[in-house]
Image: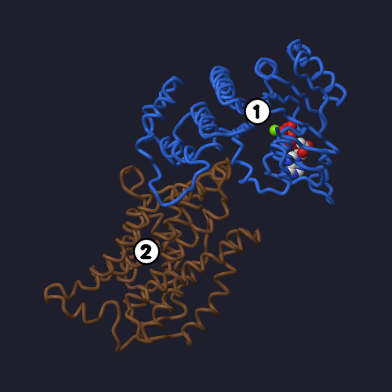
Amino acid sequence: MLLSILEQGLIYGILALGLLITYRILDFPDLTVDSSFPLGAAVSAVLTVRGMAPVWTLFFAVLAGCLAGLITGLIHVKCHVRDLLSGIITMTGLYSINLNIAGKANVPLFGGDTLFKNPFTRAFPAFLAPYATLLIILVITLIAKLLLDWFLSTKAGFLLRAAGDNPSVVTTLAQDQGRVKILGLMIANALVALSGAVMCQQQRYFDISMGTGAMVIGLASVIIGTNIFRSLRFMRSTTMALIGSVLYKASVAIALQLGLDASFMKLITAVLFLIILVISQFRPKKVRLHV
Amino acid sequence: MFEVRHIDKTYSPGTVQETCLFRDFSLAIEPHSFVAVVGSNGSGKTSLLNILCGSIDVDQGTILMNGEDITRMKDYKRYRKIGRVYQNPALGTCPTMTILENLSMADNKGKRFNLTGGVNKKRIEAYKEMLLPLGLGLEDKLSVPVGMLSGGQRQTLALLMATMTPLDFLILDEHTAALDPKTAELVMALTDRIVREKQLTTLMVTHNLRHAVEYGDRVLMMHQGNIVLDKGGEEKKNLKVEDLLGLFNTISIECGN
Ligand SMILES: Nc1ncnc2c1ncn2[C@@H]1O[C@H](COP(=O)(O)OP(=O)(O)O)[C@@H](O)[C@H]1O
Ligand SMILES: [Mg+2]
Protein backbone atom coordinates (compact mmCIF):
# COMPACT_ATOMS: atom_id res chain seq x y z
CA MET A 1 0.00 0.00 0.00
CA LEU A 2 2.89 2.33 0.79
CA LEU A 3 4.20 1.70 -2.68
CA SER A 4 0.89 2.60 -4.25
CA ILE A 5 0.60 5.78 -2.13
CA LEU A 6 4.05 6.88 -3.26
CA GLU A 7 3.32 6.04 -6.90
CA GLN A 8 -0.03 7.84 -7.00
CA GLY A 9 1.21 10.66 -4.80
CA LEU A 10 4.11 11.41 -7.10
CA ILE A 11 1.98 11.20 -10.23
CA TYR A 12 -0.50 13.66 -8.72
CA GLY A 13 2.57 15.59 -7.60
CA ILE A 14 3.16 16.64 -11.21
CA LEU A 15 -0.42 17.92 -11.22
CA ALA A 16 0.33 19.78 -7.98
CA LEU A 17 3.33 21.44 -9.65
CA GLY A 18 0.94 22.76 -12.30
CA LEU A 19 -1.44 24.11 -9.68
CA LEU A 20 1.47 25.66 -7.84
CA ILE A 21 1.90 27.87 -10.90
CA THR A 22 -1.74 28.80 -11.37
CA TYR A 23 -2.85 29.15 -7.75
CA ARG A 24 0.24 30.06 -5.78
CA ILE A 25 2.25 31.96 -8.35
CA LEU A 26 -0.29 33.43 -10.78
CA ASP A 27 -3.22 33.58 -8.35
CA PHE A 28 -5.46 32.23 -11.12
CA PRO A 29 -8.21 29.77 -10.15
CA ASP A 30 -7.82 27.57 -13.21
CA LEU A 31 -10.54 24.98 -13.72
CA THR A 32 -9.11 23.91 -17.07
CA VAL A 33 -7.24 21.34 -14.98
CA ASP A 34 -10.24 19.04 -14.63
CA SER A 35 -10.15 18.38 -18.34
CA SER A 36 -6.51 18.96 -19.26
CA PHE A 37 -5.72 16.03 -16.94
CA PRO A 38 -7.89 13.57 -18.95
CA LEU A 39 -6.73 15.33 -22.12
CA GLY A 40 -3.17 14.24 -21.43
CA ALA A 41 -4.46 10.77 -20.60
CA ALA A 42 -6.54 10.53 -23.79
CA VAL A 43 -3.65 11.61 -26.00
CA SER A 44 -1.27 9.20 -24.33
CA ALA A 45 -3.75 6.30 -24.42
CA VAL A 46 -4.71 6.72 -28.06
CA LEU A 47 -1.14 7.12 -29.28
CA THR A 48 -0.05 4.10 -27.23
CA VAL A 49 -2.82 1.98 -28.67
CA ARG A 50 -1.79 3.11 -32.16
CA GLY A 51 1.68 1.77 -31.46
CA MET A 52 3.73 4.79 -30.47
CA ALA A 53 6.39 4.18 -27.81
CA PRO A 54 4.74 5.17 -24.48
CA VAL A 55 7.53 7.61 -23.59
CA TRP A 56 6.92 9.59 -26.75
CA THR A 57 3.20 9.85 -26.03
CA LEU A 58 4.13 11.94 -22.98
CA PHE A 59 5.54 14.68 -25.21
CA PHE A 60 2.33 14.88 -27.18
CA ALA A 61 0.33 14.95 -23.95
CA VAL A 62 2.45 17.89 -22.78
CA LEU A 63 1.86 19.64 -26.08
CA ALA A 64 -1.90 19.11 -25.80
CA GLY A 65 -1.82 20.50 -22.26
CA CYS A 66 -0.01 23.60 -23.53
CA LEU A 67 -2.78 24.12 -26.06
CA ALA A 68 -5.49 23.76 -23.41
CA GLY A 69 -3.74 26.39 -21.26
CA LEU A 70 -3.33 28.60 -24.31
CA ILE A 71 -7.07 28.50 -24.99
CA THR A 72 -7.98 29.41 -21.41
CA GLY A 73 -5.38 32.16 -21.50
CA LEU A 74 -6.63 33.61 -24.76
CA ILE A 75 -10.25 33.54 -23.56
CA HIS A 76 -9.23 35.36 -20.39
CA VAL A 77 -6.77 37.85 -21.85
CA LYS A 78 -8.15 38.57 -25.31
CA CYS A 79 -11.89 38.17 -24.67
CA HIS A 80 -11.67 39.70 -21.17
CA VAL A 81 -13.59 36.84 -19.56
CA ARG A 82 -13.13 36.41 -15.78
CA ASP A 83 -10.43 33.90 -14.80
CA LEU A 84 -12.75 31.35 -13.22
CA LEU A 85 -15.16 31.44 -16.15
CA SER A 86 -12.39 31.14 -18.75
CA GLY A 87 -11.30 27.88 -17.15
CA ILE A 88 -14.86 26.61 -16.94
CA ILE A 89 -15.44 27.34 -20.64
CA THR A 90 -12.31 25.43 -21.69
CA MET A 91 -13.07 22.64 -19.26
CA THR A 92 -16.57 22.18 -20.66
CA GLY A 93 -15.48 22.32 -24.27
CA LEU A 94 -12.52 20.02 -23.76
CA TYR A 95 -14.82 17.26 -22.54
CA SER A 96 -16.06 16.75 -26.09
CA ILE A 97 -12.57 17.08 -27.48
CA ASN A 98 -11.31 14.43 -25.08
CA LEU A 99 -14.15 12.14 -26.02
CA ASN A 100 -13.36 12.57 -29.69
CA ILE A 101 -9.64 12.09 -29.26
CA ALA A 102 -10.23 8.86 -27.34
CA GLY A 103 -13.09 7.80 -29.62
CA LYS A 104 -15.00 6.47 -26.62
CA ALA A 105 -15.36 7.07 -22.90
CA ASN A 106 -12.98 4.24 -22.03
CA VAL A 107 -9.71 3.15 -23.60
CA PRO A 108 -7.98 0.20 -21.95
CA LEU A 109 -4.25 -0.32 -22.48
CA PHE A 110 -4.29 -4.01 -21.62
CA GLY A 111 -2.03 -6.28 -23.57
CA GLY A 112 0.37 -3.85 -25.22
CA ASP A 113 3.42 -2.15 -23.77
CA THR A 114 3.01 0.78 -21.40
CA LEU A 115 5.41 3.22 -19.83
CA PHE A 116 5.78 0.78 -16.95
CA LYS A 117 5.58 -2.57 -18.73
CA ASN A 118 7.95 -2.74 -21.66
CA PRO A 119 11.21 -4.43 -22.70
CA PHE A 120 13.17 -1.87 -20.68
CA THR A 121 11.35 -2.57 -17.39
CA ARG A 122 11.41 -6.32 -18.02
CA ALA A 123 15.21 -6.06 -18.04
CA PHE A 124 15.19 -4.76 -14.45
CA PRO A 125 16.90 -7.15 -11.99
CA ALA A 126 14.45 -9.17 -9.94
CA PHE A 127 15.04 -7.31 -6.66
CA LEU A 128 14.24 -3.98 -8.35
CA ALA A 129 11.28 -5.21 -10.38
CA PRO A 130 8.59 -4.39 -7.76
CA TYR A 131 9.92 -0.83 -7.61
CA ALA A 132 10.27 -0.32 -11.35
CA THR A 133 7.03 1.65 -11.61
CA LEU A 134 7.90 3.87 -8.66
CA LEU A 135 11.40 4.51 -10.01
CA ILE A 136 10.12 5.55 -13.42
CA ILE A 137 7.51 7.82 -11.85
CA LEU A 138 10.17 9.30 -9.59
CA VAL A 139 12.41 10.08 -12.55
CA ILE A 140 9.61 11.74 -14.53
CA THR A 141 8.41 13.74 -11.53
CA LEU A 142 11.92 14.88 -10.67
CA ILE A 143 12.59 15.97 -14.24
CA ALA A 144 9.37 18.00 -14.20
CA LYS A 145 10.24 19.52 -10.83
CA LEU A 146 13.82 20.40 -11.75
CA LEU A 147 12.77 21.93 -15.04
CA LEU A 148 10.18 24.04 -13.24
CA ASP A 149 12.72 25.08 -10.58
CA TRP A 150 15.10 26.11 -13.30
CA PHE A 151 12.44 28.03 -15.21
CA LEU A 152 11.39 29.94 -12.10
CA SER A 153 14.98 31.12 -11.65
CA THR A 154 15.24 32.60 -15.15
CA LYS A 155 14.25 36.10 -16.24
CA ALA A 156 11.06 34.75 -17.81
CA GLY A 157 10.34 32.87 -14.58
CA PHE A 158 10.85 36.04 -12.53
CA LEU A 159 8.28 37.76 -14.71
CA LEU A 160 5.83 34.92 -14.12
CA ARG A 161 6.28 35.25 -10.36
CA ALA A 162 5.88 39.01 -10.63
CA ALA A 163 2.66 38.62 -12.63
CA GLY A 164 1.07 36.80 -9.71
CA ASP A 165 2.70 38.87 -7.02
CA ASN A 166 1.96 42.30 -8.43
CA PRO A 167 0.80 42.60 -12.04
CA SER A 168 1.38 46.35 -12.10
CA VAL A 169 5.12 45.73 -11.78
CA VAL A 170 5.04 43.64 -14.96
CA THR A 171 3.31 46.45 -16.82
CA THR A 172 5.72 49.13 -15.60
CA LEU A 173 8.58 46.86 -16.70
CA ALA A 174 7.13 47.40 -20.19
CA GLN A 175 6.05 43.76 -20.46
CA ASP A 176 2.62 42.48 -21.49
CA GLN A 177 1.13 40.86 -18.39
CA GLY A 178 -1.46 39.13 -20.55
CA ARG A 179 1.26 37.24 -22.38
CA VAL A 180 2.93 36.29 -19.13
CA LYS A 181 -0.37 34.92 -17.78
CA ILE A 182 -0.93 32.90 -20.95
CA LEU A 183 2.57 31.45 -20.71
CA GLY A 184 1.94 30.48 -17.08
CA LEU A 185 -1.34 28.77 -17.95
CA MET A 186 0.35 26.86 -20.76
CA ILE A 187 3.14 25.56 -18.52
CA ALA A 188 0.69 24.70 -15.75
CA ASN A 189 -1.65 22.75 -18.01
CA ALA A 190 1.28 21.04 -19.71
CA LEU A 191 2.27 19.67 -16.31
CA VAL A 192 -1.32 18.69 -15.57
CA ALA A 193 -1.63 16.84 -18.89
CA LEU A 194 1.70 15.09 -18.24
CA SER A 195 0.34 13.99 -14.88
CA GLY A 196 -2.80 12.64 -16.58
CA ALA A 197 -0.75 10.80 -19.19
CA VAL A 198 1.45 9.11 -16.59
CA MET A 199 -1.63 8.22 -14.54
CA CYS A 200 -3.24 6.62 -17.58
CA GLN A 201 -0.07 4.62 -18.25
CA GLN A 202 0.07 3.44 -14.66
CA GLN A 203 -3.61 2.51 -14.41
CA ARG A 204 -3.54 1.06 -17.94
CA TYR A 205 -6.70 2.77 -19.05
CA PHE A 206 -8.16 6.12 -20.01
CA ASP A 207 -11.49 7.13 -18.59
CA ILE A 208 -13.34 10.28 -19.58
CA SER A 209 -14.20 11.09 -15.96
CA MET A 210 -10.70 10.61 -14.54
CA GLY A 211 -10.23 14.38 -14.31
CA THR A 212 -13.18 15.08 -12.05
CA GLY A 213 -11.77 16.54 -8.87
CA ALA A 214 -8.24 16.82 -10.26
CA MET A 215 -8.15 20.51 -9.45
CA VAL A 216 -9.22 19.88 -5.86
CA ILE A 217 -6.63 17.13 -5.42
CA GLY A 218 -3.84 19.28 -6.81
CA LEU A 219 -4.83 22.32 -4.83
CA ALA A 220 -5.17 20.33 -1.61
CA SER A 221 -1.65 18.96 -2.17
CA VAL A 222 -0.22 22.43 -2.72
CA ILE A 223 -1.92 23.79 0.40
CA ILE A 224 -0.83 20.86 2.58
CA GLY A 225 2.76 21.08 1.38
CA THR A 226 3.17 24.82 1.56
CA ASN A 227 1.52 25.04 4.99
CA ILE A 228 3.40 22.23 6.69
CA PHE A 229 6.75 23.51 5.51
CA ARG A 230 5.88 27.20 5.60
CA SER A 231 8.61 28.01 8.09
CA LEU A 232 11.35 26.34 6.07
CA ARG A 233 12.67 29.18 3.95
CA PHE A 234 15.29 27.05 2.23
CA MET A 235 12.81 24.49 0.94
CA ARG A 236 11.51 25.08 -2.55
CA SER A 237 7.77 25.33 -2.98
CA THR A 238 7.98 22.68 -5.73
CA THR A 239 9.38 20.22 -3.17
CA MET A 240 6.61 21.20 -0.77
CA ALA A 241 3.95 20.55 -3.43
CA LEU A 242 5.34 17.08 -4.18
CA ILE A 243 5.48 16.08 -0.52
CA GLY A 244 2.03 17.60 -0.02
CA SER A 245 0.71 15.42 -2.80
CA VAL A 246 2.09 12.22 -1.25
CA LEU A 247 0.66 13.21 2.15
CA TYR A 248 -2.70 13.91 0.57
CA LYS A 249 -2.76 10.51 -1.12
CA ALA A 250 -1.81 8.94 2.21
CA SER A 251 -4.74 10.59 3.98
CA VAL A 252 -7.16 9.41 1.29
CA ALA A 253 -5.74 5.90 1.65
CA ILE A 254 -6.24 6.07 5.41
CA ALA A 255 -9.84 7.20 4.93
CA LEU A 256 -10.46 4.20 2.68
CA GLN A 257 -8.66 1.94 5.13
CA LEU A 258 -11.02 3.11 7.87
CA GLY A 259 -13.74 1.29 6.01
CA LEU A 260 -15.16 3.95 3.73
CA ASP A 261 -16.43 2.51 0.48
CA ALA A 262 -14.49 3.44 -2.66
CA SER A 263 -17.68 4.86 -4.14
CA PHE A 264 -17.27 7.68 -1.63
CA MET A 265 -13.94 8.61 -3.22
CA LYS A 266 -15.02 12.03 -4.51
CA LEU A 267 -16.84 12.79 -1.27
CA ILE A 268 -13.69 11.97 0.65
CA THR A 269 -11.75 14.21 -1.72
CA ALA A 270 -14.13 17.09 -1.14
CA VAL A 271 -14.41 16.74 2.64
CA LEU A 272 -10.67 16.32 3.03
CA PHE A 273 -10.15 19.46 0.98
CA LEU A 274 -12.57 21.36 3.20
CA ILE A 275 -10.76 20.17 6.32
CA ILE A 276 -7.43 21.24 4.87
CA LEU A 277 -8.81 24.65 3.91
CA VAL A 278 -10.19 25.24 7.39
CA ILE A 279 -7.07 24.03 9.18
CA SER A 280 -4.70 26.03 7.02
CA GLN A 281 -6.94 29.12 7.02
CA PHE A 282 -6.08 29.36 3.37
CA ARG A 283 -7.20 32.56 1.76
CA PRO A 284 -6.67 33.31 -1.90
CA LYS A 285 -4.03 35.96 -2.47
CA LYS A 286 -6.56 38.31 -4.03
CA VAL A 287 -8.22 38.83 -0.69
CA ARG A 288 -4.97 39.43 1.13
CA LEU A 289 -3.53 41.88 -1.37
CA HIS A 290 -6.36 44.34 -1.35
CA VAL A 291 -6.98 44.83 2.35
CA MET B 1 7.90 66.25 -24.38
CA PHE B 2 4.65 64.81 -23.10
CA GLU B 3 1.42 66.28 -24.37
CA VAL B 4 -2.34 65.83 -24.26
CA ARG B 5 -4.43 67.75 -26.78
CA HIS B 6 -8.14 68.48 -26.49
CA ILE B 7 -8.96 65.36 -24.55
CA ASP B 8 -12.43 64.44 -23.30
CA LYS B 9 -12.99 61.84 -20.61
CA THR B 10 -16.30 60.74 -19.13
CA TYR B 11 -16.42 57.96 -16.56
CA SER B 12 -19.28 55.41 -16.66
CA PRO B 13 -21.05 57.02 -19.63
CA GLY B 14 -24.74 56.29 -19.96
CA THR B 15 -25.19 55.33 -16.30
CA VAL B 16 -26.40 57.24 -13.26
CA GLN B 17 -22.79 57.60 -12.12
CA GLU B 18 -21.81 59.34 -15.35
CA THR B 19 -19.07 61.89 -14.52
CA CYS B 20 -17.60 64.14 -17.13
CA LEU B 21 -14.08 64.78 -15.88
CA PHE B 22 -12.13 66.32 -18.76
CA ARG B 23 -13.59 68.47 -21.52
CA ASP B 24 -11.24 69.83 -24.17
CA PHE B 25 -8.31 69.49 -21.77
CA SER B 26 -4.81 70.25 -23.08
CA LEU B 27 -1.42 70.24 -21.41
CA ALA B 28 2.15 70.20 -22.67
CA ILE B 29 5.08 69.21 -20.50
CA GLU B 30 8.45 70.54 -21.67
CA PRO B 31 11.38 68.14 -21.89
CA HIS B 32 13.46 67.89 -18.70
CA SER B 33 11.01 69.90 -16.64
CA PHE B 34 9.83 68.93 -13.17
CA VAL B 35 6.12 69.62 -13.02
CA ALA B 36 4.36 69.47 -9.65
CA VAL B 37 0.60 69.01 -9.66
CA VAL B 38 -1.59 69.87 -6.68
CA GLY B 39 -5.36 69.95 -6.25
CA SER B 40 -8.20 68.72 -4.10
CA ASN B 41 -9.33 65.09 -4.08
CA GLY B 42 -11.28 64.15 -7.17
CA SER B 43 -9.86 67.00 -9.24
CA GLY B 44 -8.56 64.51 -11.82
CA LYS B 45 -4.84 64.30 -11.05
CA THR B 46 -4.63 60.53 -10.97
CA SER B 47 -6.88 60.32 -14.03
CA LEU B 48 -4.49 62.58 -15.93
CA LEU B 49 -1.53 60.35 -15.04
CA ASN B 50 -3.53 57.25 -15.97
CA ILE B 51 -4.37 58.79 -19.34
CA LEU B 52 -0.72 59.62 -20.01
CA CYS B 53 0.39 56.09 -19.04
CA GLY B 54 -2.44 54.37 -20.91
CA SER B 55 -4.06 52.85 -17.82
CA ILE B 56 -7.34 54.39 -19.02
CA ASP B 57 -8.51 55.45 -22.48
CA VAL B 58 -9.72 58.87 -23.54
CA ASP B 59 -12.97 59.47 -25.42
CA GLN B 60 -11.56 62.22 -27.62
CA GLY B 61 -8.27 63.94 -28.30
CA THR B 62 -4.67 62.86 -28.74
CA ILE B 63 -1.77 61.98 -26.50
CA LEU B 64 1.75 62.67 -27.77
CA MET B 65 5.03 61.32 -26.45
CA ASN B 66 8.13 62.95 -27.94
CA GLY B 67 5.92 64.04 -30.83
CA GLU B 68 4.61 60.56 -31.54
CA ASP B 69 0.87 59.92 -31.33
CA ILE B 70 0.45 57.26 -28.63
CA THR B 71 -3.30 57.61 -28.08
CA ARG B 72 -3.91 54.00 -29.15
CA MET B 73 -0.65 52.56 -27.80
CA LYS B 74 -0.99 49.84 -25.11
CA ASP B 75 0.03 50.84 -21.60
CA TYR B 76 2.93 48.40 -21.26
CA LYS B 77 4.55 49.71 -24.45
CA ARG B 78 4.42 53.28 -23.15
CA TYR B 79 6.33 52.21 -20.03
CA ARG B 80 9.42 51.58 -22.18
CA LYS B 81 10.07 55.28 -21.71
CA ILE B 82 8.14 55.88 -18.49
CA GLY B 83 8.93 55.06 -14.88
CA ARG B 84 6.07 55.24 -12.40
CA VAL B 85 5.75 55.24 -8.62
CA TYR B 86 2.34 54.95 -6.97
CA GLN B 87 1.00 56.28 -3.69
CA ASN B 88 0.69 52.77 -2.30
CA PRO B 89 4.21 51.40 -1.61
CA ALA B 90 2.85 47.88 -2.27
CA LEU B 91 2.19 48.65 -5.93
CA GLY B 92 5.77 49.24 -7.00
CA THR B 93 7.43 46.02 -5.82
CA CYS B 94 6.80 42.27 -5.69
CA PRO B 95 6.28 41.26 -2.04
CA THR B 96 7.20 37.56 -2.17
CA MET B 97 10.35 38.21 -4.20
CA THR B 98 13.58 39.31 -2.54
CA ILE B 99 15.15 42.75 -2.85
CA LEU B 100 17.80 41.23 -5.11
CA GLU B 101 15.18 39.60 -7.34
CA ASN B 102 13.14 42.80 -7.53
CA LEU B 103 16.19 44.89 -8.42
CA SER B 104 17.33 42.32 -11.00
CA MET B 105 13.98 42.49 -12.75
CA ALA B 106 13.98 46.27 -12.78
CA ASP B 107 17.55 46.22 -14.06
CA ASN B 108 16.41 44.15 -17.03
CA LYS B 109 13.71 46.57 -18.17
CA GLY B 110 14.10 47.30 -21.86
CA LYS B 111 15.83 43.97 -22.46
CA ARG B 112 14.33 40.55 -23.09
CA PHE B 113 12.97 38.47 -20.24
CA ASN B 114 14.34 35.22 -21.65
CA LEU B 115 15.60 31.94 -20.24
CA THR B 116 18.90 33.24 -18.91
CA GLY B 117 19.42 33.47 -15.15
CA GLY B 118 17.10 35.90 -13.39
CA VAL B 119 19.86 37.27 -11.16
CA ASN B 120 23.11 38.55 -12.60
CA LYS B 121 25.64 37.98 -9.80
CA LYS B 122 28.03 40.51 -11.30
CA ARG B 123 25.54 43.27 -10.59
CA ILE B 124 25.16 42.54 -6.87
CA GLU B 125 27.98 44.90 -5.90
CA ALA B 126 26.44 47.67 -7.97
CA TYR B 127 23.09 47.17 -6.23
CA LYS B 128 24.75 47.34 -2.83
CA GLU B 129 26.51 50.56 -3.78
CA MET B 130 23.20 51.96 -4.89
CA LEU B 131 21.48 51.03 -1.61
CA LEU B 132 24.27 51.95 0.81
CA PRO B 133 23.96 55.77 0.64
CA LEU B 134 20.24 55.57 1.46
CA GLY B 135 21.11 54.65 5.04
CA LEU B 136 18.16 52.26 5.30
CA GLY B 137 20.27 49.13 5.73
CA LEU B 138 18.79 47.59 2.60
CA GLU B 139 22.22 46.59 1.29
CA ASP B 140 22.40 43.87 3.96
CA LYS B 141 18.90 42.60 3.20
CA LEU B 142 19.25 41.62 -0.44
CA SER B 143 17.83 38.15 0.19
CA VAL B 144 14.88 39.36 2.28
CA PRO B 145 11.42 39.25 0.63
CA VAL B 146 10.25 42.80 -0.05
CA GLY B 147 6.94 42.13 1.71
CA MET B 148 8.82 42.14 5.02
CA LEU B 149 10.11 45.69 4.59
CA SER B 150 8.53 48.86 5.99
CA GLY B 151 6.46 51.15 3.78
CA GLY B 152 9.29 53.66 3.53
CA GLN B 153 11.83 51.00 2.58
CA ARG B 154 9.48 49.59 -0.03
CA GLN B 155 8.71 52.98 -1.53
CA THR B 156 12.42 53.84 -1.73
CA LEU B 157 13.00 50.55 -3.47
CA ALA B 158 10.06 51.20 -5.81
CA LEU B 159 11.55 54.56 -6.73
CA LEU B 160 14.96 53.01 -7.43
CA MET B 161 13.35 50.25 -9.48
CA ALA B 162 11.31 52.70 -11.51
CA THR B 163 14.39 54.72 -12.43
CA MET B 164 17.16 52.12 -12.79
CA THR B 165 17.22 51.93 -16.55
CA PRO B 166 17.38 54.78 -19.11
CA LEU B 167 14.06 56.64 -19.24
CA ASP B 168 12.54 59.84 -20.49
CA PHE B 169 9.64 60.31 -18.11
CA LEU B 170 8.94 59.83 -14.44
CA ILE B 171 5.35 59.75 -13.18
CA LEU B 172 4.82 60.12 -9.44
CA ASP B 173 1.37 59.91 -7.86
CA GLU B 174 1.49 61.15 -4.24
CA HIS B 175 4.43 58.84 -3.79
CA THR B 176 5.31 60.25 -0.37
CA ALA B 177 1.75 60.49 0.97
CA ALA B 178 1.74 57.12 2.72
CA LEU B 179 5.06 57.70 4.48
CA ASP B 180 5.94 59.25 7.84
CA PRO B 181 7.25 62.86 7.59
CA LYS B 182 10.91 61.94 7.97
CA THR B 183 10.82 59.15 5.38
CA ALA B 184 8.75 61.38 3.09
CA GLU B 185 11.53 63.99 3.14
CA LEU B 186 14.13 61.31 2.45
CA VAL B 187 12.23 59.87 -0.49
CA MET B 188 11.53 63.36 -1.84
CA ALA B 189 15.22 64.30 -1.68
CA LEU B 190 16.16 61.05 -3.41
CA THR B 191 13.54 61.72 -6.07
CA ASP B 192 14.98 65.17 -6.71
CA ARG B 193 18.52 63.78 -6.99
CA ILE B 194 17.50 61.07 -9.46
CA VAL B 195 15.43 63.47 -11.55
CA ARG B 196 18.31 65.97 -11.81
CA GLU B 197 20.97 63.31 -12.45
CA LYS B 198 18.98 61.54 -15.17
CA GLN B 199 17.38 64.72 -16.49
CA LEU B 200 13.97 63.09 -16.41
CA THR B 201 10.82 64.85 -17.51
CA THR B 202 8.80 64.52 -14.34
CA LEU B 203 5.15 64.86 -13.44
CA MET B 204 4.62 64.68 -9.70
CA VAL B 205 1.23 64.77 -8.00
CA THR B 206 1.50 65.78 -4.36
CA HIS B 207 -0.62 67.06 -1.50
CA ASN B 208 2.46 68.59 0.06
CA LEU B 209 2.36 72.20 -1.17
CA ARG B 210 5.87 72.84 0.14
CA HIS B 211 7.28 69.95 -1.89
CA ALA B 212 5.48 71.29 -4.96
CA VAL B 213 6.95 74.77 -4.59
CA GLU B 214 10.39 73.59 -3.47
CA TYR B 215 11.04 70.92 -6.09
CA GLY B 216 8.83 71.81 -9.05
CA ASP B 217 10.10 73.94 -11.95
CA ARG B 218 6.46 74.46 -12.74
CA VAL B 219 3.44 74.15 -10.48
CA LEU B 220 -0.08 73.27 -11.63
CA MET B 221 -3.24 73.32 -9.59
CA MET B 222 -6.18 71.25 -10.81
CA HIS B 223 -9.83 71.56 -9.95
CA GLN B 224 -12.74 69.59 -11.36
CA GLY B 225 -10.81 68.53 -14.43
CA ASN B 226 -9.41 71.97 -15.17
CA ILE B 227 -6.07 73.63 -14.61
CA VAL B 228 -6.81 76.62 -12.40
CA LEU B 229 -3.20 77.68 -11.81
CA ASP B 230 -0.12 77.20 -13.97
CA LYS B 231 3.11 78.88 -12.86
CA GLY B 232 6.41 78.26 -14.57
CA GLY B 233 9.71 80.09 -15.10
CA GLU B 234 9.95 83.49 -13.33
CA GLU B 235 6.39 83.30 -12.06
CA LYS B 236 7.19 80.03 -10.33
CA LYS B 237 10.26 81.53 -8.67
CA ASN B 238 8.05 84.08 -6.94
CA LEU B 239 5.41 81.52 -6.01
CA LYS B 240 4.99 80.95 -2.28
CA VAL B 241 3.33 78.12 -0.40
CA GLU B 242 0.93 80.72 1.08
CA ASP B 243 -0.23 81.74 -2.42
CA LEU B 244 -1.05 78.15 -3.25
CA LEU B 245 -2.77 77.60 0.07
CA GLY B 246 -4.82 80.77 -0.43
CA LEU B 247 -6.10 79.69 -3.84
CA PHE B 248 -6.69 76.17 -2.56
CA ASN B 249 -8.91 77.47 0.25
CA THR B 250 -10.82 79.87 -2.01
CA ILE B 251 -11.71 77.05 -4.38
CA SER B 252 -12.68 74.73 -1.56
CA ILE B 253 -15.01 77.36 -0.08
CA GLU B 254 -16.68 77.89 -3.46
CA CYS B 255 -17.42 74.18 -3.50
CA GLY B 256 -18.85 74.35 -0.02
CA ASN B 257 -16.36 72.18 1.84
N1 LIG C 1 -12.59 54.31 -12.46
C1 LIG C 1 -13.43 55.34 -12.23
N2 LIG C 1 -14.75 55.20 -12.46
C2 LIG C 1 -15.59 56.23 -12.23
N3 LIG C 1 -15.21 57.42 -11.80
C3 LIG C 1 -13.91 57.62 -11.54
C4 LIG C 1 -12.95 56.58 -11.74
N4 LIG C 1 -11.72 57.06 -11.42
C5 LIG C 1 -11.91 58.33 -11.03
N5 LIG C 1 -13.22 58.67 -11.10
C6 LIG C 1 -13.77 59.99 -10.79
O1 LIG C 1 -13.03 60.97 -11.46
C7 LIG C 1 -12.77 62.06 -10.63
C8 LIG C 1 -11.28 62.32 -10.54
O2 LIG C 1 -10.65 61.27 -9.84
P1 LIG C 1 -9.07 61.18 -9.66
O3 LIG C 1 -8.45 61.35 -10.99
O4 LIG C 1 -8.75 59.96 -8.91
O5 LIG C 1 -8.77 62.48 -8.78
P2 LIG C 1 -7.53 62.84 -7.87
O6 LIG C 1 -6.40 61.91 -8.15
O7 LIG C 1 -7.22 64.25 -8.23
O8 LIG C 1 -8.01 62.75 -6.45
C9 LIG C 1 -13.42 61.76 -9.29
O9 LIG C 1 -14.64 62.43 -9.24
C10 LIG C 1 -13.63 60.28 -9.31
O10 LIG C 1 -14.79 59.94 -8.62
MG1 LIG D 1 -5.30 60.60 -6.85
Q: What element does badge 1 sit on?
A: strand
Q: Is residue A162 above or below residue B211?
A: below
Residue B68: percent from the left, percent from the top? 71, 42
Observer able to see residue A225: no
Residue most toward the front?
A: B67
- Mark 1 vs mark 2: same chain? no
The chain letter of the blue chain reads B
Instruction: Write down the colour of chain A.
Output: brown
**Mark 2, other Cα within 10 Å: few <14 / some 14–19 / many ≥20:** many
Kindly identify the residue that appears in the image at 38 percent across and 30 percent down.
B141
Q: Residue at x 72, y 49 (%)?
A: B72
Q: Amino acid at mark 2?
A: Ile
Q: Is residue B257 left or right of residue A218?
A: right
The residue tagged 2 is A14
Q: Which residue is tagged 1? A: B202
Chain under numbered label 2: A
